[in-house]
Structures are given as structure tokens and as C-alpha cells.
Image: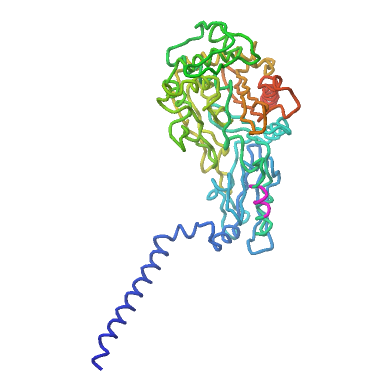
Amino acid sequence: MSELVVPIRRVAKFVYILFFVLVAQLTYLQVVRADDLKNDKFNVRTVINEFARPRGDIITSDNQVVAYSQPSKDELKFQRIYPQGPLYGHITGFQSILVGNTGVESAYNSALRGRRGEEQNVPRVVLSINSEIQTLIAEQLGSNIGAIVVMQPSTGSIIGMYSNPTFDPNLVAVHSSSEAQKAYTTLVQDEEKPSVSRAFSERYPPGSTFKIVTAASAIEAGIADAEREFPQAFSFTPPLTDKKIQNFGGGACGGTLQRSFRQSCNVTFAKLGDELKDNFVTEMGKFGFGGQLQNDINVGQAPPLDIEGAVGATAPKENSYAKDAPNFAFAGIGQGLVSASPLSVALFSATIANLGTMPTPHVVDRLEDANGNVTRRIGLSPWKENVISPTTAASVRDFMVDAVNRGTGTRARLNGIQVAGKTGTAQAACAPEAPSCPPHAWFTSFAPAESPEYVVTVFIQRSSGGALSESAATGGQLAAPIAKAVYEKLFALR
């Protein structure tokens, strides 16, 4: 019998160890990782619980419902409905049993959750979006691929933001896993990328709209003012290259900085980019361009939009002028290593409108409880202050007014209201087999110029679409009239 004592003790010790490990594991799962497991989007019980409770409406600033829940007859209890579908797809996002939540549905998930048994007593999220403006900008963009952003510069409230192509969130929000999977696969495999908002999730060369930043940078750095004279020239050849930067249309231009801005003179602004040298990166960094290397690209902080997906703007690398001088000249005209989303362009335009303050952009205005009481307001603090001096901003504002009154932006002029704006026509990257491709067309602006209420930024990707010659597919021809139509609607709403 004594010879069995030692083996029995070993077995007992082993059992004790297993018991201890089991208790430790259960403690770890139930205490340490409880919240992670509870909120894991792949936790089936968590998903069912999310759909089994009522969920608040998402409404526009003028009380149009763009997302609501209705009772369903399956285990999930409630079906999320998006009555205007594609018009708000990139903003509302969706609530999906398959891939989780996106857009406002994700960012404000906790604010939208109701309690079981209280279907008539749920909170809601109120957007800053105006339904009439959202409908108008979708109509104005039409079949063009691109995006439009309409913002209040003083607050960062986004009044309208639409990107084409878009998608219908209802297709992904269905309760059938197979149908949701089919819709989601179709969506993400579409080469036109309708699931990605071109308004804030994609970057493009801003073209001559970036001359706003170049002019401000040159004035801030003390190398130019409104009256500095530049020689009339057909082209500018940066150091370290024999590639000439020419003016649009091939003509000569120059004169004062203000005249060069009015004419959108490439030669002047390429020269300024070259003269600014490494200081240019510092100055454009104040506007959110560059700041951190990502895969060898100098990318700025993403705008703090209150829904996921915003991308930062890019710039030449810091202290790279000695080896990469040509890209500083190209940056001066918004080409080369400079790229930005339409939202970023709207934000640097808002900075000029605010005389140096960059607002925090947001699509949600406020959260309300079931009784309509405001529980939280969104975007009350600016993103960046003292980006540039008020006097510099006022000078650039005057340039923008001149560009609309008698320069490249005359198609945006309004009767009785002064618009400040800048056109842009940016070369697009062509497919390898294509000898040439249409440019991007831009127009960014604010109005009234002296007391800005709205910023309107219009972007049309590869603007001619085969319907216009490359010389006619410009920001002044295509994007500026759209901005005018938006302003006419905005000021008629007052």
C-alpha cells in the first residue's frame, strides 16, 4: 500500500494544478477580458443582444429620418431601415449582423442604444446635415464621380456631404447572413469603390486650390506679399531637373502675387514653392499636410471627423529639398507629392474664412434623450488655432475674392453676395495603357467673403468623362457653377 502513496500524491498535485489553471482561466475570462468578449463583434450572443433592443433614429437637422428600426419576426427582433438609402450611405453607415456597424451607426452606437421593453422611449442622434442641401448636392454632382462638402466654417458643422458613387446600406443591413454576405462582397469588390467616401476617405492632387496654402505660406514666411512682382513667363524649370512647369493653356503670366493668384499662374506658384524650400513643408504642415511618415509617405493627421475613415493630407518629406527640389515646385501648384481629400481642402478654406482657425469637422450636431432633451453637443472646440495670422488670412481671402470677381472663378459669382474662391484643375494619374486622361476639377470657396457662413468645396474626379476636351474640363468650367447653385440654395434657406 505504501508504494501507492507517492503516485497518488502526484496525481493529486496534478489535479490541484489543473483546478487552479481552470479557476485562473475562468477568472481571466470573466473579469479581465469580460468587456472585450462582450463587445467582440464576432460574439453571436452580443450581436443578438444588439439587435434585440430598440435603437434610436438618426435624423437630419430639418427632421428627416434617415435611419430607424422596425420590429422584425426573427430572433434579432429589430430590422434597421435606411429610408433614403444611398443619399446618406457614407454618413449613416449601417448596422450589420455580418460586418458590424459603420458610419454614425458605429461612432454613436452607445448613444443610439435603447432598452428592452421601451420601444417608444429611445434616444436619437441629430445630424448637422440639411436634407435639402444633401439632395441638391447629389443632384448637382449627377453622374460625375466625385464629392461635395458643405460646411459652416465657424463651427465645422457639415451641412451636406455627398460622394458618388455611393451605396445602399439597406442591402448590407438585412438579417439573412447569406444575403448580407452577397451584398457586402459585391460592394467591396466593385472597382469603382462605392463603399469608400471620396469626400473624406480618398486623397487626390488638389491642383490650383492648393495655391491658397502656397500663397499663405509665402506670406507667413516673409518671401512675398500681395504686391510682389513676378516676371511674365511661359514656364519655370526647377533645380535638379529639365522638366518645365508650364501654365495652363501654355501662355505666359506673372505680375503681382494677387494677379498671379487671380490668373492661377503656375509659374509664379511653382517658383514660390521652390523659394520656400524646406520651410514649405513646415508651413503646409500647419494646414494638416504631412507630419508623419507612413510607408515612406509624409502624411498629416487625419481630420478629426466624428465618423471613421478620414485620411490625412500628404506633403513632401521634411528636409528633403536638397535632394528633391522639383517636388517643392510641383507642390506649389498642388501636384506631385501633395494630395488631400475634399474634406481637407474644405478645412484649409475654412481656415482662411476664420482668419486662421481650423474647425473640427462633424456630421452630428447633437445627441438627444427620449424626451428631446440635448444630452451632448458635438464639435464645440476648433481643431487648430493660430494656423496663420489674421492679416495673412485676410490677404488670401482678398485674393480669393479677386479670383471669383475677375479671375478663373467667375462662374461662381452671386448677385448681392460676395463669394471668395479658388479653382483647381489637377492632373490625374493615368492607367498604364492610357497615353492621357482627363484632369480632376476643383472649386473651393466660402461666402459671404467678409462674414463667412458656408464653405463649399466641389471635386469632380477625371472631370471630362469623355464629354469635354481636356482644355474645357476645368474647375472653373465644371466645379464653380455647382458651387454657385449650392450657394443660391443655401442663402434662399435663410
Segment tinted magenta in the rendering: 182-188
- Residue with the most extreme bottom position: 1
Residue 415 visible in the picture: yes
Tell me residue 303's x, y (percent).
Answer: 51, 34
Report the residue at 59% width, 8% height from top. Answer: 253
The colour scheme used here is: rainbow
Left or right: 203 as drawn, with respect to 433: left
> How far across and down, in percent of the image, does residue 76 sit?
63, 61
- Identity of the residue drawn at 71% across and 46% down: 83
What is the quadrant of the C terminus in the image? Answer: top right
User: Which one is in front, 76 or 58?
Assistant: 76
Is residue 333 toward the left or the right of residue 22 in the image?
right
In the depicted view, which residue is nearer to us: 298 or 35?
298
Q: Is residue 467 above or below residue 107?
A: above
Q: Nearer the viewer, residue 464 or 303?
A: 464
Magenta: main secondary structure equals: helix
Based on the picture, tell me whether residue 355 belongs to the magenta stretch.
no
Q: Position of residue 421 (x, y in %)?
A: 60, 19
Res. 371 visible in picture:
no
The percent coordinates of residue 431 (x first, y second) are 64, 33
Q: Is residue 429 left or right of residue 319?
A: right
Residue 101 or 451: which is nearer the viewer?
101
Question: Where 119 sits versus 307, above or below?
Answer: below
Q: Residue at x 51, y 24 (%)?
A: 351
Asked which quadrant contains residue 3, the reply is bottom left
Q: Quadrant of the N terminus?
A: bottom left
Residue with the most extreme left position: 2
